[in-house]
Image (cartoon, rainbow, N blue to C red):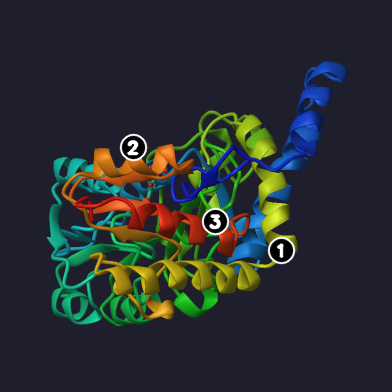
Amino acid sequence: MPAGVYLLSHAVGCRPRHLPELEAFLQAWQSQPAGWDAWLALLEDFCDAIATLLHAAAATDVCPQTNVSAAVSKIVGALPQRRGRYVLLASELDFPSVIYVLRQAERLGYTLKLLPADGTGTSLATWTEHLTDNVQLALVTHGFYGTGALSDVAAITAQARRRGVTTVVDVAQSAGLVPIDVAAWDADFVVGSCVKWLCGGPGAGFLWANPAHVAQYEPMDVGWFSHADPFAFDARNFRYVGNARRFWGGTPSVLPFAGAIAGLRCIQELGVAAIRAHSQQLTGQLLTAAAQHGWSSPTPTAAAERGGTVVLQTAQPARLLQHLRIGDIIADARQGFGVRLSPHIYNSSADIAHTIDCLATAPGLL
Ligand SMILES: Cc1ncc(COP(=O)(O)O)c(C=O)c1O
């Protein structure tokens, strides 16, 4: 653990002490330079761990990706042409990188419509109003990076399914923190990464594709690992593999996934339900103090409606962060939202009590 009170898990989760798969990767590289058997087995273990985390039916419903933006980009390039459906929907509270991807899709003839924030997120009522017959795709963020609110994903995806809209759920701020059951959501795609709450480091993203619907999506961005038989080496015939792996591409990256498995195993052993309960207790402790001191926060007070981040509004984020740093508290701030504080399983109630004491001695900053 870094020294001090680490409250940055919304950005980068802490590194597990032991990384045996990373060592195995390096070992295979040294002992058998074309160590693909071991490396592909490792990638299979990664997909298996993500499938378990998401309650997916099979590891083949999961495809490794570099990050969330790359996954969304590939999905946009895979959408079937459907007459009259030219609108892409997202929330103005989504992570900007994902919005950048959807904005680029306007070059393909789509129109991006950003739904307004109403309260701490974009509500089901707003989604329902906009999920109309001209919508091709809806990007639904489970946990918002700037407010700490959770979306009611199941209700939104159910509406979208009824209206024939493809759904992509971004779980970057919830995977490893909030229990996820992809079967209950019935989305078309779920995309995330391991760098935050899954404590897996950067570069190990993932895409889950609904096996009941994946066949209609044909990514532009492919490679031999998207092929039904990568080792056919038949340059004249490309056939998509019939599952999420069609979103894979060329020779797979292995290193980030080798690094990510240890974090996934830790999270699995601890149990996402236990992590969620601990997180709700600590974020509740922060929000109770905020109410007592009159600090303003956009984060929902109802535990079920928030993820793992408590945001405190301040006109002087840089000064507040500096004040926290002197108290050995590591946090960050986001433009337009405030200072973000994200306790994880490795934080204690005493950490939060210390953070509250420190915030209480920051006169005029909150
Ligand atoms: C909700 C959400 N989505 C996505 C990302 C990151 O996207 P990418 O993996 O493309 O960098 C973040 C990062 O903070 C996020 O908070």
Residue indicated by mark 3: 351
Tell me the SS state at disc 2. helix
Give the image location of residue 171, x and y in percent. 44, 59
Image quadrant where one finds the C terminus:
bottom left
Could you tell me residue 22's position as x and y percent?
A: 74, 32
Is 101 in front, or is 178? 178
**Name of the residue lying farthest toward the right:** 31
Q: Nearer the viewer, mark 1 or mark 3?
A: 3
Q: Earlier in the sequence, mark 2 or mark 3?
A: 2
Q: Is any part of residue 240 visible from this angle?
A: no
For label 1, count other residues whose C-alpha is less than 10 Å away and answer few (under 14), some (14-19) or many (20+).
few
Observer able to see residue 153: yes
Q: Which quadrant would the N terminus be assigned to in this image?
A: top right
* Identity of the residue drawn at 34% across and 72% down: 151
Nearer to me, 175 or 224: 175
Tell me if mark 2 has few (under 14), some (14-19) or many (20+) residues whose alpha carbon lies within 10 angstroms of its own: some
Q: Which residue is mark 2?
A: 322
The residue that label 1 is drawn on is 270
Q: Quadrant of residue 333?
A: top left
Q: Secondary structure at mark 1?
A: helix
**N-terminal label among 1 and 3:** 1
Q: Looking at numbered disc 2 in the image, what kind of residue is underneath it?
A: Gln
Against 118, residue 337 (above or below) is above
Give left or right: position of 151 versus 271.
left
Which is more toward the observer, 266 or 341?
341
